[in-house]
Image: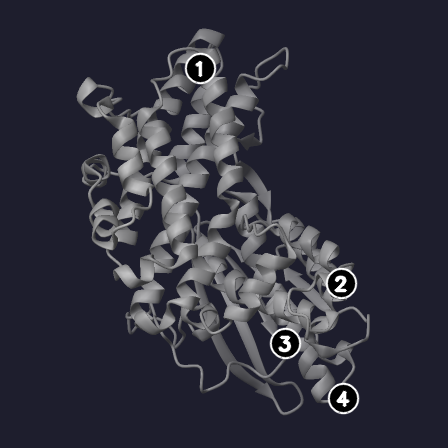
Amino acid sequence: MNRIRPSLKSSAWRSSSSTSRQSAISPLGNEDNQKINFYSNSHILRYAEMEAAPFSLRQLIFFGKVLGRQGSNDKEVDHNLMQGANFTRVQLAIRLARQIREFQSLPYIVTSNPYLTETYQMYVEAFESFRLYPEIRCRLDNQKWSQFLENLLNQHKVVIPKLAIGVAESRSHLTNSQVEQFMTRMLYSRISRRVLAEHHIALTRQFQGDSSSKPSSQNIRYLGVIDTELEIGNVVQRCIELAQTTLNSHNLGGSSSQQPVTVLVRGEKDAKFAYIPDHLEFIVFELLLNAFRATVSSAAQRSLDLSNLPIEVQIASSVTHITIRISDQAGGILHSWRPSFTDDDDESLPPTVSRREMFSFVNMTTANDSLKQLVSSTDGTMEGKVREQVDQAHDQHHIPSSSISSPSSTNTRGLELIQEARLRIGLPLSSIYAQFLGAFCLFLFSTYSNPFSGIRHSCELIAQQS
């Protein structure tokens, strides 16, 4: 993490900045001029050709340990944090430039969609802010930079819903492959940018905060956004409780009963590893919520008590791997759900697929009304964290029917649309989280266990420990 790229502050880069910014994002009367300005920002082209330095979980942890190293004084900590700040300043600009180029590679009729145009403009404005931000040279500069990052992160919470609606509305102009590749690249890059920013903000608070003594890496558990001793059993139990709360709030699955879903957690509940808690929580929560919905619906259709269809969570660990398997008995994956994209080209792997329709962004584009219902019922944000979803579920449970955007919809139908939209975004996003940093492999498979329990649908997360 101590590898810092040049600050790129020459006058040539700064010249006519306001003109280039305006030409890149301001609407003009002539459509041809709009097309030219959409593609003609030379700064974006230059940054997009620069190297986006890869980073790993190990590097993020190492940088945190360097800050908390025994014997290091405030001056050394400030110096390392300034290096980290300038690293994020340059790398965020490079990553944003590449994402802007992703936008520009789409057909113009797609990028002219109002939702995508607004997202594109937000990215260009953020890129210009990073490009023109002065080099961080002192502790005060770094604290201002951290506040600037935090404000920008909050402003960009609207990006995921806008991307989803824009792509859904432009579906007729895009192939399945284009939808999948565009959304995957956009969200993967978004996660990487937010991790860089949030990690630096957290480290700044941790090592430049108001506390009288600096924490030592010898006895510290949290380093930035990373929990170095994340206990899987605690994460699973918390996600079970949150999924049950969400299920009850929205009456998901079509059952009016508030009977809790039975979840059996087995295996090594105290297994620990270093990871980003928000990411693991989001993955497990989305998989559990999907299993909860399917189980409640299946129990109602088959006139069974929920206790007869328990969900099982198996946790296993070894020196090199950690496995979390979530299994339900709601009928398995339909044969009509063909894999749209698969990572499992190796014949030595089990006959599973890591991407099915339920984890594909193509499936998201068929729910345009639901996506708009989600945006209109909230402040239009989606950060990609569990606490956000649970809070919104609680708030939406008390929405009067008059606040649902479609006058012809009942309150119940409006809530169903909201949850359908969240599920169609959440499951594909959980797959991106699983792949991020190469941390997890996500497998789906169905097995026929016995005549009484029938087909068992399993989601398996496998993490390789470093």
User: Which label number is shown at residue 249?
Assistant: 2
> Which amino acid does the dot numbered 4 rest on?
Ser
Mark 2 vs mark 4, CA separation in Å: 22 Å
Picture layout, residue 196 above or below residue 165: above
Q: Quadrant of the N terminus?
A: top left
> Which amino acid does the dot numbered 2 rest on?
Ser
> Which amino acid does the dot numbered 3 rest on?
Ala
Label 2 Cα crowd, 10 Å radius (few <14 / some 14-19 / many 20+): some
Q: Identify the residue at image location x=75%, y=80%.
A: 308
- Percent coordinates x, y for residue 271 in the rendering: 59, 49
The mark closer to the camera, 2 or 3, is 2
User: Which label number is shown at residue 303?
Assistant: 4
Q: Which residue is mark 3?
A: 294
Of helix, strand and loop, which one carries label 4?
Answer: loop
Q: Are the residues tagged 1 and 2 within 8 Å (C-beta)?
A: no
Q: Identify the residue at image location x=46%, y=87%.
A: 335
